[in-house]
Image (cartoon, grey):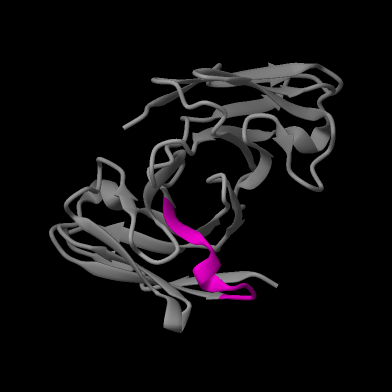
Amino acid sequence: EVQLVESGGGVVRPGGSLRLSCAASGFTFDDYGMSWVRQAPGKGLEWVSGINWNGGSTGYADSVKGRFTISRDNAKNSLYLQMNSLRAEDTALYHCARVSWVGAIYYWGQGTLVTVSS
Amino acid sequence: DIQMTQSPSSLSASVGDRVTITCRASQSISSYLNWYQQKPGKAPKLLIYAASSLQSGVPSRFSGSGSGTDFTLTISSLQPEDFATYYCQQSYSTWIFTFGPGTKVDIK
């Protein structure tokens, strides 16, 4: 059974940093690209960042470019999102997701909540 | 980045109605378009991938069409469990797979 379990969320002040982690199990992790998708309370889905199977190719939404860094450790079956210079508008539930070969997402984690507030 | 728009932003429909949701990309994305359904408090569910391929286990009343910049999700006969928010997503741009703003389908 595919499982994606996020951790690392919490309350942080504007300008602060957080590192999200996603522990993957139930599939061959380095066969798949991975992504982070967020959803602010009462709002729509927003693609945050994606990474290919070996970390050699990444992409970021304009809203987080230069502040967030996605990475993965295939030996640990883990995905990460380093978030710096956090803003109030980064407040959201952050989902880890497995990306299929056509870029679709079938498996989602339950999410970790990030709240940026003074 | 490629921008995605959806219309309408919301609609009211009755059980048994045929419902059509449109998604438009700011540039050609070939057939790299996926559709999701999301219910409150739940993770999104993949319905359609590659514009027109039905995900395994999804009822056949859901269908997708289109290519280039214009795409459509159709529900042929709306069922009570279909009241939800629907999102399109492009997967053409390398590792920046933008979502549309969503279409909320509720009960008339």
Q: x%, y% of residue B81?
A: 79, 38
Left or right: where A25 falls relative to A89: right
- Of residues B59 and B86, which is closer to you in this image? B59
Q: Residue at x 61, y 46 (%)?
A: B40
Q: Which residue is at the front of the view, A35 or A56?
A: A56
- x then y, percent, for residue A19: 29, 70
Is A90 on the left or on the right of B104, as rendered?
Answer: left
Residue B36 visible in image: yes
A95 to B5, vertically: above or below: below
B60 or B8: nearer the eye?
B60
Q: Is residue B41 left or right of residue A74?
A: right
Picture coordinates of residue B95, whole percent (x, y)? 39, 47
Residue at image coords 70%, 73%: A1
Q: Quadrant of the C terminus of chain B?
A: top right
Is residue A33 shown in magenta? yes
Q: Which residues make up the magenta segment? A: A25-37
Q: Residue at x 72, y 35 (%)?
A: B53
Taking B80 as reference, is B66 above or below it? Answer: above
The relative height of residue B4 versus residue A97 in the rendered view (above or below) is above
Picture quarter with the N terminus of chain B: top left
Please check the rendered image and state whether residue B2 is part of the magenta-colored stretch, yes or no.
no
Give the side of residue A79 with respect to residue A68, left or right: right
Q: Is residue A96 visible?
A: no
- How many numbered tags mark residues here? 0
Task: Give how far across and how far down residue B42 sits, in percent.
Answer: 62, 52
Residue under the point 73% across and 18% down: B19
